[in-house]
Image (cartoon, helix red, strand yellow):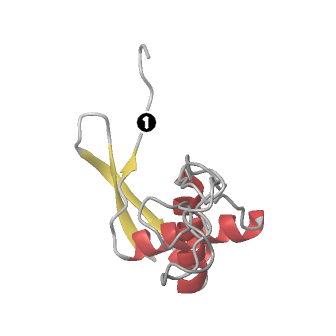
Amino acid sequence: MISLPVFDKQGTQVGTYQIDPAELAPRINKQLLHDAVVMYQSNRRLGTVKTKNRSEVAGSTRKLYRQKGTGRARAGTRRTNIRRGGGMAHALRPRDWSYRLPRKALQLATRMALAARVRDQEVVLINELSFAEP
């Protein structure tokens, strides 16, 4: 059992509250906590990246120079990814990075995070939290 301080609105301690962290979560599963944090971070990603591939780059489709007789390497278009200013070979596209963990897994991860805070005594309880106006 861990004793947590209880404060009122003025910040004075009015009592203590006994809590057992094992009631919240019997054990801390670091992998589940990690998965939950990564999910929350992934859901915040915008995914608005975009680059042009060779079909989207502005420019002519004319062959640069003839196929044979120049002594240079064969070249078909100036929009190829090898050339400067050409398109990307595997262009980046906008993507939705969000996904969801199962509901019970998220609930357990939340309880584990709270239990870890209680064990480290980083939790403060407030006696009454009512406001006269919003």
Q: Residue at x 58, y 61 (%)?
A: 92
Q: Secondary structure at mark 1?
A: loop
From the viewer's perspective, is 9 left or right of 29? left
Determine which residue is flagged by label 1: 128
From the viewer's perspective, is 18 left or right of 100? left
Position in image of residue 126 (x %, y %): 39, 45
Viewport quadrant of the C terminus:
top left
Judge whether residue 28 can be spotted in this image: no
Q: Residue at x 66, y 58 (%)?
A: 98
In this view, the residue in front, 18 or 134, is: 134
Q: Is residue 97 above or below residue 3?
A: above
Position in image of residue 54 (x %, y %): 61, 60
Judge whether residue 90 can be spotted in this image: yes
In this view, the residue in front, 43 or 28, is: 43
From the viewer's perspective, is 132 left or right of 47? left
- The three-letter amino acid code for the residue at tag 1 is Glu
Q: Residue at x 67, y 64 (%)?
A: 107
